[in-house]
Image (cartoon, coloured by chain):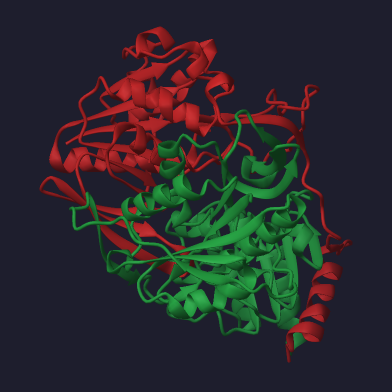
Chain colours: A red, B green
Amino acid sequence: MNIIVCIKRVPETTDADIFIDKTGKGIDKSGLVFDLNEWDSYAIEEAILLKEKLGGTVTVLSMGGEDTNESIRKCLAMGADDALRLTDSAFEGSDGFATAKVLAEAIRKMPYDLIFTGTQAEDDGYGQVGVTLAEFLGIPHAALVNRIEVQDKKVKAHRELEGGLEEVVEIDLPAVLTIQTGINEPRYVSIMGIRKVAKKEIKVLKTSDLNLKPEEVGLAGSDIRLEKLFLPPVGEGAEMLEGKPEDVATKVFDILKDKGGLA
Amino acid sequence: MKEIIVVAEHRRGELRDVTWEMLSKGRQLAESTSAELGVALLGKGMNPLAEALKPKVKRVLLIEDPRLEAFNPETYKKVLIQLITERKPFLTLIGHTAMGMDYAPRLAASLKMPLATDCIGIEAKDESLSLIRQLYGGKVNAEVSFTKKGPFMVTVRPGAFPVVEKEPLAGEIVSIPSPLTDEGLARRFVEFVEAAAGEVDITQADILVSVGRGIKEIANIPIVKELADALGAPLACSRPVVDKKWLPKGCQVGTSGKTVKPKVYIAVGISGAFQHIAGMKGAGTIIAINKDPKAPIFSVAQYGIVGDLFKIVPVIKDKIKQLKK
């Protein structure tokens, strides 16, 4: 089973304060920590689990700058075998459609049975790259996968629907699966583990290596363009309970009694 | 005449909320652009749904085929390529749902049609559209536009557009022949599986205590569980807690978990991703405890406590135990 996993390095913003930069089209990333996109960490883990069970190889593929190596090395330390980075200034401004196009051109030259992507990225959240990639490659797909069983020449995949429902589908290989969080427990990677793969080769390809023209990628090859960023309008907002913890606790008790019928 | 087409989403014989939301938004856009609103309905035995949709649109574009009984992105793609190629709607709206995310990107790429996903705002602007999407988990909004000419496809975030009641329309049902054949599919539907029910039913409680990523590790869960116990309330949680296997799936509140409407919902260490808010915004009163004063949870909560949950929650638990006596 040869598996390609498409990954992305993203800023960690869950617990961070976000400021829009002077251009109005980006955020100030200076104080932010970057890491492997959360969905992708589940995708790479799932690929490695399958490799451990069935043999084969796991190849990491990422479009991004040189600093993407950090996330690629994390995947190699987890157990991926090879890595390929797609780097070109012409890729800047790529939306989900253009990203899928670039990934597809790289993948055409590689052997594979399965391709995994995260269901979406934490930063721009398009949730479209994997499914678009499947269209470019002309192979079947399933999105939001939270369980996989490989059978002969096909996989049985569970798709996560709304309200706790799952849809089980059977897909012929090769196929693209977009992986949902919670499918497994991504393994921990130590600093020592990352050091061990520090010298491993990460191949780099650019536009001209991919049979793509500059106008087919980046903003020129994208469907959508960012006009401006703004902070989401806040609603009326909560009444803030302030004071000593004991006083706050008493207020909470009063609310519970009043609104929750607490005896 | 210009046309806007909403692709209806239905599952197990019922139209899903996002369909009505798209029709409401679609009607407003149709009125502002002098377009007609249509809804594409694909499936088997769709007449009751077609009747229900009639008052919302100019026409119901009905494609009946036994091969459309279960959703499949391959059959949807084939049918919608034919429909869109023939009718040339200037805008096609699809839900950004587990179903829409599973076919819209392929359909758009196949039609070479520009696509904007997960939109929470859509306005007609000149001959194009201005769209609002969210970035960084909802911390930033982005205004985006299409780089190319239409026709366009937009996927719509569930819950983003309210259903506004308007004068009913005299919609007609137009039956369209299905282009599907018995040719084999590379992906086949097998079955639906319900997530295992939890030990406690979190949808029936008057008071619900819910814990999120802010709890940091599984060893800390008892801190919040003790508060729930003191209140006689079940413990619920947000998605990251289930993803990390700290609590079972049956405890999860949100789009992919349960929708709850307790009298009081206490959110502990939950930042308030829209998927979570979608599952609990119907609570009578929401109390949120979070260290980040900018957390989106505070914009839906009636009461907020900014601070360290590890210090605050035990004090609240003790106070409740003491005052309940």
Residue B281: quarter of image:
bottom right
- Work out whether A9 lies above or below B78: above
Asked whether A25 or B14 is in front, the reply is B14
- Work out whether A34 lies above or below B254: above
Asked whether B289 or B75 is in front, the reply is B75
Which residue is painted at 40% across and 75% down in the image?
A: B12
Position of residue A135 in the picture relative to residue B133 (left or right):
left
Q: Residue furthest top?
A: A208
The quadrant of the image that shows the C terminus of chain B is bottom right
- Work out whether A187 lies above or below B185: above
Q: In the rendering, at what x and y percent does residue B158 appear?
A: 60, 59
Q: Is residue B65 visible?
A: yes
Residue B255: quarter of image:
bottom right
Q: Residue furthest left?
A: A152
Q: In the rendering, at what x and y percent does residue B300 appear?
A: 76, 63
Asked whether A22 or B160 is in front, the reply is B160
Q: In the rendering, at what x and y percent does residue B103 appear?
A: 41, 49
Q: In the rendering, at what x and y percent does residue B8 appear?
A: 51, 63
Q: Is residue B223 visible?
A: no
Which residue is painted at 39% across and 43% down in the image?
A: A42
- Counting labels gives 0
Residue B124: quarter of image:
top right
